Image (cartoon, grey):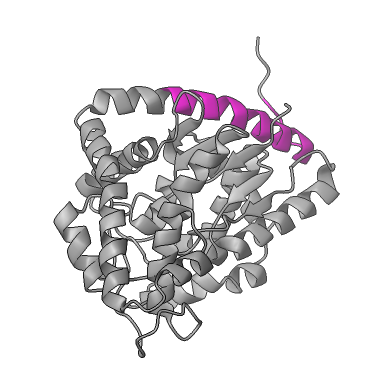
Amino acid sequence: MSKKIILSGVKPTNVLTIGNYFGALKNWTKLQKDYVCFFPAVDLHSITVKVNPKDFKQQTYNVIASYIAAGIDPDHCTLFLQSQVPAHAELTWILNCFSYMGELNRMTQFKDKSARAGTTIPTGLFTYPVLMAADILLYQANLVPVGQDQKQHIELTRDIALRMNNLYGDDLFTIPEPYIGSVGAKIMDLQNPESKMGKSDSADTGAVYLSDSDNEILKKVKRAVTDSGSEIKGTEDQPGIRNLLTIQSSITGLSQSELIKQYAGKQYGHLKVETAELLVEEIRPVRETINKLLNNINYLDAILTKGAEKASQAAQVTLEKVYERIGFVRSKKV
């Protein structure tokens, strides 16, 4: 295969935010022409916390609709649901047997999330990175578009892959590399710009969702927390300003330094209003397309069926190779 392989996915735990849109989906649309792309909705990852079945199903469709609305071509990329490809769960068990408690215990996200879970920490929260490793290694992915907070998981995936390659042959797994977009890789919470904007963790006023109306977007951005002082400098001590500049940069393609020059002598209010207006124009067609797609579930189901078949074919090749190298007896076709 001449083109390199990319895999990345989003958990369907809520409606996607502009953080998902600029940090992930927009980057994927730029990559889809030059790579073989697998973009699942990673629904198995979602159940490390309790989900409402009805909402969960709707959120899963919403993620796939958001992929398409953002510009990802389902005829060119493989869009599918992780749970519809059993090889993900099968390879996870095998990788569990080749990963170590100590390295999983060091995962920063596990430490953060387990602290919030109290005494009832789900086992799935602990082994979550192993499932992520299976997602990547099944498709022999060369690159994995991730945010900075996911780099540690890619490092674990590489460690497990190298460990198994040393035991069973260098051609067992491709060793993946993280791909981090240069712009919009991390959009922060509008009310707490020291924290990443999240689908579930952010307060409604701090997160802008792809489902938000024009008026809701305007209100949220205009109420965004800014910083002390009056000059728009975009320095480290201005996290709120930097966040608004990052959003503008993601929309316009201008660098933050270029934007700062444009705001010389202007007040924070100008930055808020203009960022809000740009964001409204950017998100409106995405929201409208998502709503249109959600009114045609049969179309989305057809895309997912096709995607699951294609993903299963690719995943099964890797899984069978792993089974054979380890020494499992495989059934013989008569």
**Residue 294 visible:** yes
Q: Residue furthest top?
A: 334
Q: Residue furthest left?
A: 215
Q: Residue furthest bottom?
A: 229
Residue 92 at x, y = what percent?
58, 48
Give 157 or 240, whichever is nearer the viewer: 240
Q: Residue at x 33, y 56 (%)?
A: 17
Picture quadrant where residue 333 is located: top right
Quarter placement of the C terminus: top right
Give 174 or 329, whichever is nearer the viewer: 174
Quarter placement of the N terminus: top right
**Residue 194 visible:** no
Residue 90 at x, y = what percent?
56, 41
Residue 168 highlighted magenta (yes or no): no
Q: Residue at x 57, y 58 (%)?
A: 182
Residue 227 at x, y = what percent?
35, 85
Q: Would you say 128 lies left or right of 218 here?
A: right
Location of residue 233 with respect to 98 vertically, above or below: below
Location of residue 8 with respect to 248 vertically, above or below: above
Q: Residue at x 50, y 30 (%)?
A: 78
Give 304 or 99, whichever is nearer the viewer: 304
Q: Which residues are magenta?
A: 306-330
Q: Residue at x 38, y 40 (%)?
A: 70
Q: Would you say 193 lies left or right of 217 here?
A: right
Residue 23 at x, y = what percent?
46, 55
- The overriding secondary structure of the stretch rendered in magenta is helix
Residue 319 highlighted magenta (yes or no): yes
